[in-house]
Amino acid sequence: MSDSNKPLNFIEKIIEDDLSSGKITQIKTRFPPEPNGYLHIGHAKSICLNFGLAQKYAGTCNLRFDDTNPEKEEMEYVDSIKEDVRWLGFQWEGDVHYTSDYFDQLYQWALYLIKEGKAYVCDLNAEEMREYRGNLKEPGKNSPYRDRSIEENLTLFEKMRAGEFADGACSLRVKIDMAHPNMQMRDPVIYRIKHTPHHQTGDKWCIYPSYDYAHGQGDAIEGITHSICTLEFVEHRPLYEWFIENLPVPSKPHQYEFSRLNVNYSVTSKRKLKQLVDEGVVSGWDDPRMPTISGMRRRGYTPKSIRDFVDSTGVTKVDGVVDVSQLEFAVREDLNENAPRAMCVLDPLKVTVTNYPEDKLEEMTAPNHPQREDMGNRSLPFTQTLFIDKADFQETGNKKYKRLVLGKRVRLRNAYIIEADEAIKNDAGEIIEVKARIIENTVGKNPEDGIKAKGVIHWVSATNNVDCDVNLYDRLFTDIAPDAGGKDFMESVNPESLQKISGCKAEVNLATPRSDIPYQFEREGYFFLDSAIDLDAGDKLVFNRTIGLRDTWAK
RNA sequence: UGGGGCGUCGCCAAGUGGUAAGGCUCUGGGUUUUGAUCUCAGCAUGCGUAGGUUCGAGUCCUACCGCCCCAGCCA
């Protein structure tokens, strides 16, 4: 809606057609995760699509937990999913829904199907059922239990519900066509026995509906007009429609499929992400290197940057892999515009200003953002001894080196221009201190002698600063497609994906950092206070680098 | 190999018969107290391939080729 020039995607076209033809008067979508893991960047796309469409077309969007398999689900996941959706900036319509809310209705409809002669209890076990199903090029054959009488099916199904059979002893199947070219239509199972308590319904049920049977009906009950899912469900659509047509449902939703979002140098499959967590490759689901929403949040990604990224990738049916640079662009774009600036020296090198009194302290005024006056100013103490980054000093530079060099000048950001006179080394020959002079009267102006500084570097007072640790991240995998073509993604885990640095010196204003906004440490990148630390409990300050600044020089 | 989905610049993606949008990446220039930002310029005689229809085809037709999905009582 904000970009009226942006071409419509295929789902928006369908919606506009439905709206203008009067087929529907208001759209209703839903985001239907199974609470069996943490949400990742791929889910963010589904969330933005479903909630975004509802916003754009003045409709509503439900949050529905597709909780039909208690063996894989946990309350921990439903809580994290709700938090992630809210954090991304979306609000679902009314209360949270659960497919389990409809178990009674779904059971009644199963009875209806049996009475219509369209469903039967099958005693085939899993292996037998596979044999009877046939394969991709050969038709299946009918189950020997397919022609049981309606009465017998009713009795058997009731026994299934009553808990008289063990897990897997039998199942309820729908009678369609065992020779159908679409495997999904070969008498799919719609109820299976699982003597497993459910996080929502407790011990009430020991039979649970399958996804295929429950999903469309859940949509129909909620009045969903456009049921959007990913491409792997395309071949389930005929089944989805079969149930809608053969059951007395209150509305007739339609399913549309789009391609899921993949990002290179990453994996997004709950199983694989879980493996990374379980094997200790990362510290948890919210490790800042994880492509999970919670990991990205802890890393410092903003909800807007994720929304913008997702929007930039489009909605199509093409299987593709988006380059991480597109994600990185979206974060930098948002952070550059909104992150207040600060200075932090990651690898301190002492600089003594020989022509500056030891007991003197000047407050330098620095804008919080170079392009946004509305963000105000802050002040920085300038003293005789300072810290600059080791990488910002060389005894002899070259034409391209725009930092501090012996005998040359450099601008200290928001302060004086200094000139280096001497490098002091330890016994190992390492530079441990630089003696320099300030050029008088150069705060906010160029030197009167006309000799300008070649570059600008950041600094912090050596006596007035805040000590902190910093975590720098690199991509979690060294392979551009870690799990493509049957590769073992664990083999390309990047051993240097996390670099922990301690002894960093930040400007005094960071002594009480905000935990809700990212900062730009000038010339170093964007940083976010690690949410895992507790400053009130005396934990040390730790900042996570969300992403570095764009760097066209280092390459 | 049965069925289904998809093939437009390195990546994402518009285009719906009238002569290839845009974004990311990359390259080069300008501005700059962040080697950032901003800004200017460049980057597909070509749309999986081969034929055909048409005054005209990425768009229509035919045949091939390639990639992805489906044989859970997972979602």
Image: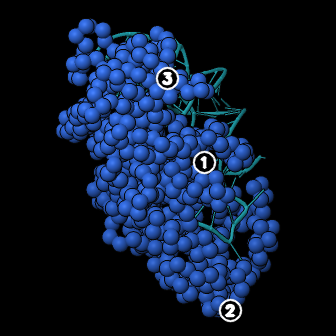
Q: Amino acid at mark 2?
A: Glu
**Chain identifier, cyan in the render:** B
Residue at mark 3 shares a chain with residue at mark 1: yes
Q: Amino acid at mark 1?
A: Val
Residue drawn at x 60%, y 70% is A72
- Element under disc 1: loop
Find the distance from the CA under tag 2 to the CA under tag 3. Answer: 85 Å
- Residue A525: x %, y % from top left: 42, 36
Q: Which residue is mark 2?
A: A164
Q: Nearer the viewer, residue A245 or A407?
A: A407
Residue with the most extreme top position: A450
- Whether residues under marks 2 and 1 lie with C-beta atoms below 8 angstroms apart, the answer is no
Foreground tag (2 vs 1): 1
Q: Give neighbour class at mark 2: few <14, some 14-19, many 20+ (Cα, 10 Å).
A: some
Residue drawn at x 25%, y 32% is A360
Dot placed on the residue nearer the N-terminal end, 2 or 1:
2
Residue at mark 2 shares a chain with residue at mark 3: yes
- Image vertical order of residue A242 relative to residue A44, above or below: below
